[in-house]
Image: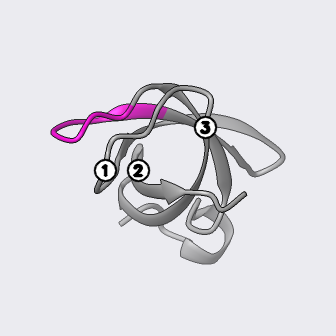
Amino acid sequence: MCAADESAQSPVGAIGRVTVPIPADGPGEVLVSVRGGSEAYAAWADHPIGINLRVIVVECISARSVIVEPFPA
């Protein structure tokens, strides 16, 4: 779903930082370190996540959309 070559392109497992708060009922935005740079993704989560918090990508739902969870401190 994310890319033709899942192993090289998938952001799953990557650490990111919330740039637009993620509400309970819609997407926010995360900046994720992938492929030697940073890319912005629309992000959903089970619970609201505030701006500047670190997250981990747990699922890719489209080329530019991911599901994240808070990254353990």
Name the quadrant of the N terminus: bottom left
Q: Amino acid at mark 1?
A: His
54 w.r.t. 21: above or below: below
52 w.r.t. 67: above or below: above
Among the two numbered marks 1 and 2 on one chain, the one whose residue lies closer to the N terminus: 1
Among the two numbered marks 2 and 3 on one chain, the one whose residue lies closer to the N terminus: 3
Residue depicted at x 36% and y 34%: 22
- Local crowd size for mark 1, using a 10 Å CA cut-off: few (<14), some (14–19), many (≥20): few
* Residue for badge 1: 47
Magenta range is 22-29
Among the two numbered marks 1 and 3 on one chain, the one whose residue lies closer to the N terminus: 1
Near-viewer residue (22 or 37): 22
Q: Amino acid at mark 3?
A: Leu
Q: Which mark is residue 27?
A: none
* Residue for badge 3: 53
Q: Amino acid at mark 2?
A: Ala
- Local crowd size for mark 3, using a 10 Å CA cut-off: few (<14), some (14–19), many (≥20): some
* Residue for badge 2: 63
